[in-house]
Image (spheres, helix red, strand yellow):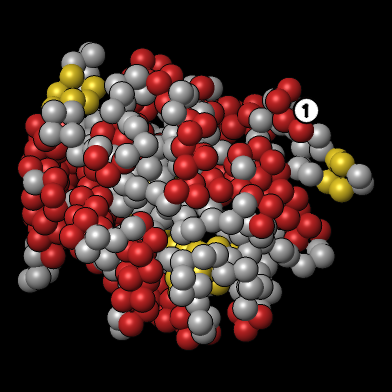
Amino acid sequence: MNWNFSLMLDKFSEYSKSKLLLEGKWGLEKESQRVTEFGDLALTDHPTVFGDKLENPYITTDFSECQLELITPPAKSIEEAYQHLKNIQLEVEKEIKGELLWPLSMPPRLPDEEQIPIARFNNSREGRKKEIYRNGLALRYGKKRQMISGLHYNFSLSDGMLEFLHKSFGKDEERRSFKNEIYFTIIRNYLRYRWLLIYLFGASPVAHPTYYSVIYQELQLIKDCCPECCNVINEYEQQFSTSLRVSRFGYSNPYPSKYNIYFNSIEEYLLKLRKLLSLKSEKYRKLGIYKDEKQLQLNDNLLQTESEFYCSIRPKQINKKDETMLNSLKERGVEYLEVRILDLNPFDKVGINLDQLYFLQVFMLFCLFEENKIITKSELHKINNNHNLSALCGRNPDLELYKYNDKKIPLQEWGREIFKKLRLIALCMDENSSENKYQFAVENELEKITNSSLLPSSLILKEMKENRESYLEFGIRRAVSNKQAK
């Protein structure tokens, strides 16, 4: 099966078919630190009013005891998912009296490593495994990296959409195989163009000084990851970063690129991820699995579990009880995609606004419409370079990215090319609405291509400068403002 943008656009240009572009399911997951009014980690226990962390499907913890994770149920519209997240956050804010939700992806003021509390779970087999896994993360990467927070955007195409695509492009292919290929096409094109999301939505251009020890460790390694990012120095405010969170200064591991995980098929993905789960690591062996009869990590493999495989997007299936994600994908295929690249937007109460979500809808359909070609080893290197360049140097007006055949192109020029296609998809989507909300969202983001001062990363630094605020003072002010917002 083969297609390209023009062919896809033609297929959905009919009014009756364009409705399919609006169908699907959506969900949001938000991580956020509980902090005191002074911007320190709240070292209190996870509020008992929220119940057992393993049993509450909407409010739990991520790495740390003070790092909340808010999870919406699947919704039939993005507006419904957004409202779900807002309602969950309002419930949380009502219960955490005297505490605030930190509005930024990079952590607040951090104590020494030993004082950062790992999330505690009940004494069940699952609870013990989760605690040991988190201990392993702390041992391998340090606790400070784990305190970074973000927002995940989950979505799936409707059965009607998949059926239409199957009839149009995959009649001779088994339905589940075709569905997997549809989602892996979206993944590959997302990887190719994710630099644009980093540029537009990156909102972590600066970090608190208590995080600098992590940054210092990476300053030399960054040259291996992204030689072009030579402007990165300690005074980040003077540089061009958009998202420290998704850069090597944030939470990342090298495995997707180091072990050539191309996402060219579900079979390849499962095979290579299983290899990472079984490969022994001499580095992690030296850390030890047990010490004084206490288990320090689950194992000494490259990955303790599949959750440790950090990538900006993941194919997902709904797990059955005691089933691993890899087994569920193998047995039933891809059910939805989890986009993990989004920084928390400090200017919105829940960390993202509806216009951003509308744009994401258009962008993910663009990733579906683009040609379904495979990723090669040389292209993977360029794709990852573009990711790092956008994260660390995105606001540099002279920044060039790698396009095809080693051709370099200015970020703004490539961005304008992509937006021509995004406009066409948004127009098609708005045929079924009088609001033109998708076109508005696209035009709103297009302005940022030529005017980087409108980017969230720029606005954060601008407010800090105008108000003569430190990173901590800015974060506290936005946290208070967001809590007061309805």
Left or right: where 48 falls relative to 71 = right
Left or right: where 48 falls relative to 312 = right
Depicted 342 relative to depicted 348: above or below: above
x, y percent for residue 68: 54, 66
Q: Which image quadrant: the C terminus?
A: bottom left
Residue 189 in view of the camera: no
Q: Which quarter of the picture shows residue 270?
A: top right
Q: Nearer the viewer, residue 242 or 18?
A: 242
Image label count: 1
Label 1 SS = helix
Left or right: where 430 falls relative to 381 = left
Depicted 134 relative to depicted 181: above or below: below
x, y percent for residue 455: 19, 51
Residue farthest along the right direction in this orientation: 293
x, y percent for residue 99: 50, 77
**Which residue shows up at 46% across the image and 66% down it?**
39
Q: Nearer the viewer, residue 115 or 189?
A: 115
x, y percent for residue 187: 38, 39
Residue farthest along the front direction in this orientation: 468
Question: Which amino acid type is marked by label 1?
Answer: Lys
**Which residue shows up at 69% across the image and 41% down it?**
139
Q: Which image quadrant: the N terminus?
A: top left
Residue 472 in view of the camera: yes
**Which residue shows up at 31% across the image and 41% down it?**
236
Which residue is labeled 1 in the image? 286
Q: Nearer the viewer, residue 371 or 461?
A: 461
**Which residue shows up at 76% across the image and 42% down it?**
297
Depicted 247 relative to depicted 376: above or below: below
Badge 1: residue crowd in 10 Å (few <14, some 14–19, many ≥20): few
